[in-house]
Image (cartoon, rainbow, N blue to C red):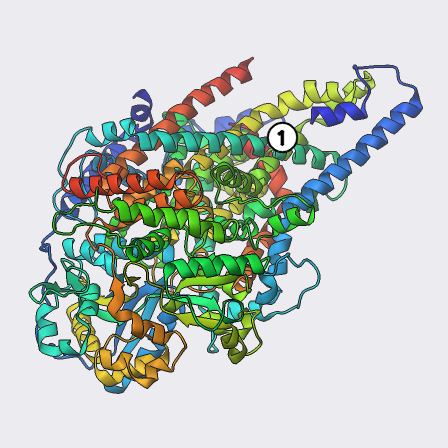
Amino acid sequence: MRYPKRTRRRPVPNRTSRLAAAALLVATTVAACGGDDDSAEAGGPKAPATIPTLTNDPLTLSFIWFEWPPAQTLEDFANAEYTKDRPNVTIKVNTVPNANWHDAMFTQFAARKTDFDIAILDSQHIGEAVTNGNILDITDFVKENIDVSAYNPYLLAAYGQFPQAETGQRDENASLYGLPLLGDTWTMIYRKDLIGEQPPKTWDEMIAAAEKCQTENPGVSGLAFHQANGSDAAAVTYNTVNGVYGGNLWNAKDRKIEGVLNDQAGHEAMDILVNKMKPLTAKGSGNWFIDEVNAAVAQGKACIAFQWIAASGGLLDPKQSTLGTTRDEILQKLGFATLPTQKTDLVPLGGMGMHISAYAPEAQQAEALNFMKWFEQADVQKKWAAAGGVPARTDALQSPEFLNASPFNKVYADSVPRMRDMWNVPEYARLVDIENTNVNAALNGAKSPRQALDDIAREQQKILDSSGKKGGAGL
Amino acid sequence: MAVFVDEAVSTGPAQDHAPPTRRFGRRGRAVVEVVLLTVLAIVMLFPVLWMVETSIKENRDVYAIPAKFFAFDFTLDHFKDVFVASGGGRSVLSISFLNSVVVAGVSTVLATVLGVPAAWAYSRFGVKAKKDQLFFILSTRFMPPVVVVIPIFLMYRQLGLIDTQLGLILIYTAFNVPFTIWMMKGFVDEVPSEYEDAAMLDGWTRLQAFRRITLPLLVPGIAATAVFALIFSWNEFVFAIFLTSSDEVRTAPPAIAGLIGGTTVDWGLVAASSVVFALPVLIFAYLVRKHLVAGVTLGAVRR
Amino acid sequence: MSAPAPVTTDEPGQVASATPPARARSRRLSDRWLAVVFISPALLLLLGMSVFPLLWALYLSFTDYSATRGGPADFIGFGNYTAILTSSQVHQRALTTLIYVVGAVTLQTVLGFTIAYLISRRTRGRGLLTTLFLVPMMLSPVVVGLFWRFMLDAQFGVVNSMLGSLGLGQVEWLTRQQTALLSLIVVDTWQWTPFIMLIALAGLTAVPKYLYEAASIDRASEWFKFRTITLPLVWPLLLIAVLFRAIEAFRLFDLVYILTSGGPGVSTETLSFHVYKVAFLGFNTGTASAYGILMVLVVIILTQLYLRYLNKLKED
């Protein structure tokens, strides 16, 4: 390596250059040593069980979320309602583009200093955040301050528990690291005028109805769903089909994916997805995510679509839709229903919880605890529902405020008992990336369904097995 | 290229053409050139025009199939949305534009202030290992920004420069200075050092000679380099996304990228913001257009 | 500011002799001082903001440090480097990047030079034309990516809409393996052709007119003039521009990120994008640093070779 050495010669004059080099070396060593000082225990520092005395000085409580309407809804809602109790507090919700959401938060965690006090993590990020000691352990706090019986235990588990429990169950002895903020799941959106008033009840029926609708209405595609290889688009799609057809994502106890994911049911699901469902989608939909699916529905180009509820609000906006000039007109054409069932009735779990950054100053942490306690109160949850959010308390979910706020809220309430989440292990980001890229490849004809699924299983297993190995990690 | 020239001109060099054929050849070639230029211009500019058109369409027409070229409803709402938030008051985008102006402007000025004298010094004086130093300076740009972000981020954290305009300004300047020095050195090489020597014989110091004689002659070069520096700082995305997080500090590219958030994309707003965002750079480039071409000549020809 | 002493033709020697060696020495000293003052700020900034991260990344590349997992950075020697150089995933991305860089830069050079040549033949409106063609380069890659993604959308995009009106089939630009990389090349070409055009134009306008006139007097044809005058004089300039573009294309991230996110599957993942995934999906800071260092080395070595070849060309 001749060249690098040559280019590193220092400029005139020599003394200054030597000094500069020395200074640089010292700085590097200091930074190198200093940067690794990690006193946080894995598992995160614990939050106090009782909320410490709150300050009366003006204080800004910052959240971080990604850019979508619920972020604005939260900010408006919190600033309107929370300030009634705590007038000296301003709530600020910082947002980043969805694709950067995970990176932006975890980069700040990595630097051990965050701009935000409350991180809104996707439920699958919890594992990574907990293992790195980035968020507070609030088990004791929850025991003292939150009425856990008012919640469906799985919701509490999904948005805060680590290690993750078996589906649908909460481990009473496990630690909690967050509380639910916004619930979300998939809704099936269907054209009442093209398919009929009644939504299909089984997955087979749904496919058949979509096929019929597509044949009868040229220019309209039967289905529209997420296929992109970014975020968690394609992965969630496959996981949903996998769940509906009786498959499993992994065996949590043994940490096995190979053989579990790509078992008979898994292969059947992938086959259905690629060979039955994909042909019913529009050409070039291979990189569709939330906005493209919404656009297809709004433009009247899809008979049946699957979309996150929290992202569906815009569908009822006459300004963006060709289905009608008023909200009622649109509602006459669009129907919302829970997902069809097949072998099981599983639906994907979406939504996010609130977690407290371990690096926020004490005063902010105390305020954050107070906010979370306030947020999970019954009346506040109902107000959150009325404002457009999705609460987590059972009584709020069943309240008229929530059910009447928008047509898909009922879908959510009915779906809660059916939800299944993905693995929230620390390696989540890489696992989901493997799944995303391979499912996307299968959907776009770059790989056969069988090959794609086997590759997913094999590579994900490699990651699970190698957590802890040294050298060349991450390739 | 060669093909089209050939078809306009008869084969072989230095032939004795009858004047009428030659005249036809010249006119024919001119026509072909104009046609080709027009076609290329249309192809290159069409996306920009389409972007402008999208920014003045209603969202309904934006997603229309087949695409609507002329028959659409005109609206200026998107431009309004760029500057006015949905609840009234300044929008986040307008704040981010302002941040972009500040960050890009200051870093360009700083890069010029640091780079021009350095380039002049490299050109005039026999600095040790000049060629290597210059190559080293340029090589600092070879690193993919994604890899540089982490140590920079850690460094900024220690210094408290995260989420500050100063932090962005520093890194942008650091990225612009190499190119500035490299390009400006070419310009300075073009200005004969005899001018300065003559001035110094007249009693001026080297510094005065530099300021009064060389600098004015370098203005075209400075203008050209400034445009490139401005373009980089203005449009930069990776550092902006990782080194800033709050709305008050964030520049425009992350803000515009953030428009494709979780729900329906307001492509009209994206288009309008893009148009507004692109204007300042375009205007600046147009103002210095004469210097651009002349400047790049001198700067890049010499090494 | 003292007025400069008048220099008369018959007395320059006297003026010079009026300033003894002491003055000359002090001028040399102040020259050196000036050089230091002028160069240091820039170099210091570069040392701090570009060299330090490079060294820091170099150090990290020999460890298994992870920015999020924290803990001590264990030294693992060349472990990361060997893993990267032998990884088939890296080879795949390297091939993709090579195809992309070669394809894009070639296309840009041809197009850029063509446009520059056409503009240089015009007598009027050059400034306007140049500025017009420069527009794509001035746009943010984010904006370009977003918009081309919209335009290339198989359903809602205007490109397919136009193809449809012409009776041709609809192409799935961004979701089919064959066309995704092509789309990336096309979009990058669209954005950066103006750069080559600018440099080529500079070179073309720098060609002295008298050369052409002399050739015309000798009844030289256009092709001859082009081949013997234009091309040789512009060639070196073009090669520099090609170098710049190749380096930038090699480092490209924004466009891939926005346009295809590396898809379909991973078929448009370039090296730069892969580094991002290694650095931020798994936060394998050590590996990512080694990856980055390797990329820098490749660029430095190739550039040195290229520049030597250029110098040889010039000497010929």
Residue A300 against residue C46 in the figure, above or below: below
Relative to A365, residue C110 above or below: above
Quarter of the rendering occupied by the N terminus of chain B:
top right
Q: Position of residue B9 (x, y in %)?
A: 81, 23
Q: How far from the left and from the top, in percent, is residue A53?
A: 12, 79
**Measured from the top left, where is residue A2 in percent x and y?**
31, 20
Q: Amino acid at mark 1?
A: Gly
Residue A238 x, y percent position in the rendering: 34, 52
**Residue denoted by label 1:** C203
B12 left or right of A418 in image = right
Q: Nearer the viewer, residue A174 or A267?
A: A267
> Is residue C49 visible to us here?
no
Task: Tell me: residue B87, above or below residue C99.
Answer: below
Task: Compare residues C223 and A333 and report the one nearer the observer.
Answer: A333
In the image shown, does A255 or B286 lie closer to the viewer?
Answer: A255
Q: Please rate how many residues cluster around mark 1, counting C-alpha atoms within 10 Å: few if below 14, some from 14 to 19, many from 20.
A: many
